[in-house]
């Protein structure tokens, strides 16, 4: 399992649009991607659960990636989130 911490920098946090973008990016990989905040987690494939984490600008979240391509998936997702200011 790969995991990393990320501080959300998008003004609106992770609402519908960035959640959808993140889900599409994660779907490009075989690994399961989970986002955690304050002890609660949601898989990126579960948009309503992901939005229900109420992730706001400045919040620190943990991204966990588990599967056959976890290393490349973690790198790709981290780069994607940084480049798209999520």
Image (cartoon, rainbow, N blue to C red):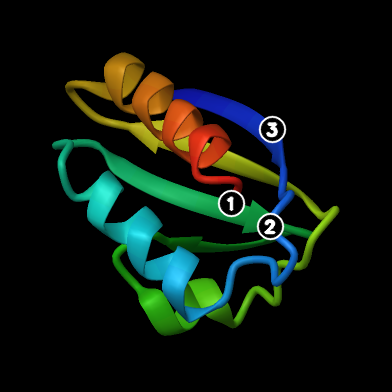
Q: Quadrant of residue 33?
A: top left
Q: Earlier in the sequence, mark 1 or mark 2?
A: 2
Which residue is denoted by mark 1 in the rendering? 86
Q: Give the residue displayed 24% in from the left and 29% down from the top.
A: 67
Mark 2 Cα within 10 Å, few/some/many (few <14, many 20+)?
A: some
Residues at marks 2 and 3 touching, judged by CB atoms closer than 8 Å: no
Quote the CA–CA distance across marks 1 and 2: 5 Å
Q: Position of residue 27 (x, y in %)?
A: 19, 50
Quote the CA–CA distance across marks 1 and 3: 13 Å
> Of the residues tagged 1 and 3, which is closer to the observer?
1
Q: Position of residue 30 (x, y in %)?
A: 14, 37
Q: Is residue 49 left or right of residue 33?
A: right
Which residue is denoted by mark 3 in the rendering? 5
Secondary structure under the numbered disc 2 in the rendered image: loop
Q: Position of residue 4 (x, y in %)?
A: 61, 27
Residues at marks 1 and 2 touching, judged by CB atoms closer than 8 Å: yes
Mark 3 Cα within 10 Å, few/some/many (few <14, many 20+)?
A: few
Relative to 18, does residue 78 appear above or below in the rendering? above
Q: Earlier in the sequence, mark 2 or mark 3?
A: 3
* Label of residue 10 in the image: 2
């Amino acid at each position: 399992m790969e995991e990393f911490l990320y501080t959300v920098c998008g003004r609106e946090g992770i609402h519908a649009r960035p959640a959808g973008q993140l889900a599409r990016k994660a779907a490009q990989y075989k690994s399961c991607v989970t986002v955690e905040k304050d002890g609660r987690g949601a898989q990126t494939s579960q948009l309503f659960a992901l939005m229900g984490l109420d992730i706001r600008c400045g919040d620190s979240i943990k991204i966990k990636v588990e599967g056959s391509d976890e290393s490349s998936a973690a790198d790709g997702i981290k780069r994607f989130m940084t480049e798209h200011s999520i």
